[in-house]
Amino acid sequence: GLLLGSKGANVSQLRIATGLRKVIMTGAHMNSYGKIDEDPRLHLVVYYEKGEEGNAAKAYDEWSEHLANLHEEVARKRNGTRQRQGARPSSKDASAEELPGEEQPLDEEGGVSETEPPDGGADIPPDGEDVLEDVDQPDAEEHPRTEEAEGGLEPEAGSLTAVLRERESGEERWHEVLSGEYTEFGEHQGRLVYSKVVQGPGEGGDEEAAAEAVPAQEVYVYFLDPANGDEATCAGWRIGAAIGGEEVWARYAGDEQVLPESGWELFVPDGDGLELFILPTAQASASGSGGNHRRKRRRKERTRRRERDRLEPGAAIGAPPPAPGYDYRPVPPVQPPRPWIAVSHGSTFYYVNQETGERTWYPPPQSQWITAPGRPAAVPTAARSRRSHRDRSHSARRSRSARRAGSGGGSTMGAGAVGRGSGSGA
């Protein structure tokens, strides 16, 4: 917004002041040269005829001066914000509990003034001292957007929101690609380009969803004009993955100077019976389109994670950070005592307390385990008795066979002895 000005006014003024034929702002995913620009930085491009090199140099000097002034303005606002906020005590500081709840006047160094305000009154400076007057009021964009009690986000000035509604009922539907907030990204063919706002991890007040976030699809709203070199069948606005790219999800056939609110033709597979409206974010937020969909999505994600964790305990809990000096040796998968559970992690395990949420690489004390590792299970008594009975039966059979064999040999020997005795007697 500060770089381009309202609706690209800074770029338009530069073109008029220098007398150049065409001045545009381009960057990543913008098709300003007949192909997709891969430079991630925003940069200014001027078109000039032979003999207009002086105008191009003038544009370079004026834009450099504009950037220098912009950097000074941003630095001045940042310093002013710090002076107004002052030094904040740490949450671990015990003296923070004794500080009054009202905001105290700040001195020139950014700290709290030595003179305390009157009890029960407003922050009134003492006689003979002046409050800071050279501190600029920071713009709304200097403050981070916070989620209000209703769950909606404070809309940014100049931003737009894409809303899809059913033709018959008028009920709003959330589309993963098209729905959402768009902000000014640059300019193409003399018209503004908008880029979908993609929330990073931890933004929007939902850190649980950020833990499972996947890379979001980049979406751009832009205008193409085949008469000026764009590869398009007709002039009009497009919503696609890249400026001038082949993947297009919605199109508006018309040469309106500003982005149209309705009349879009959808090319998404699940767009049957839906209408696309692009409204100012303030208007869309007032109707509850933005915050309600975000809250429903977050609630659905939390429900899904709770259900998955109920069916598979510990699945939604990430592995704890590595412990210093721990070599992560393989741990035998022994069932720990409740409420602890062992969760597989590569060749080892980590342990989660389902009641407190505690996570650790170290198992609970060995004395508390249900079955200590390395101790073989006891052999059941009944099985041991059956084996002993079989052994005794087998031994008894062998004893009887031996006795039978012994009885036969004794009879033969006895007969011989008798014979020999008879012979001797004879």
Image (tube, rainbow, N blue to C red):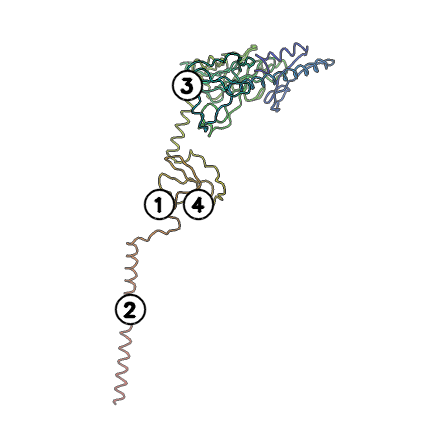
Asked if labels 4 and 1 touch by Cβ distance under 8 angstroms, the answer is no
Give the quadrant of residue 254: top right
Task: Give the number of the disc on residue 149.
Answer: 3
Asked if labels 1 and 2 touch by Cβ distance under 8 angstroms, the answer is no
Foreground tag (4 vs 2): 4
- In primary-sequence order, the first of circles 3 and 1 is 3
C-alpha gap between disc 2 and disc 1: 50 Å
* Extreme residue toward the right, this view: 51
Q: Position of residue 379 (x, y in %)?
A: 32, 53
Residue corresponding to mark 2:
401
The residue at 52%/21% (across/down) is 111
* Extreme residue toward the bottom, this view: 426
C-alpha gap between disc 4 and disc 2: 55 Å
Q: Amino acid at mark 3?
A: Ala
Task: Give the number of the disc on residue 370.
Answer: 1
Q: Position of residue 3 (x, y in %)?
A: 59, 16
- In primary-sequence order, the first of circles 3 and 2 is 3
Give the quadrant of residue 109: top right
Foreground tag (3 vs 2): 3
- In primary-sequence order, the first of circles 3 and 4 is 3
Circle 4 crowding by C-alpha within 10 Å: few under 14, some 14–19, many from 20: some
Q: Position of residue 38 (x, y in %)?
A: 61, 24
Residue corresponding to mark 4:
331
Q: Which element is circle 3 on?
A: loop
- Which of the image's four quarters has the C terminus? bottom left
Foreground tag (3 vs 1): 3
- In primary-sequence order, the first of circles 2 and 1 is 1
Q: Which element is circle 2 on?
A: helix
Foreground tag (2 vs 1): 1
- Which of the image's four quarters has the N terminus? top right
C-alpha gap between disc 3 and disc 2: 95 Å
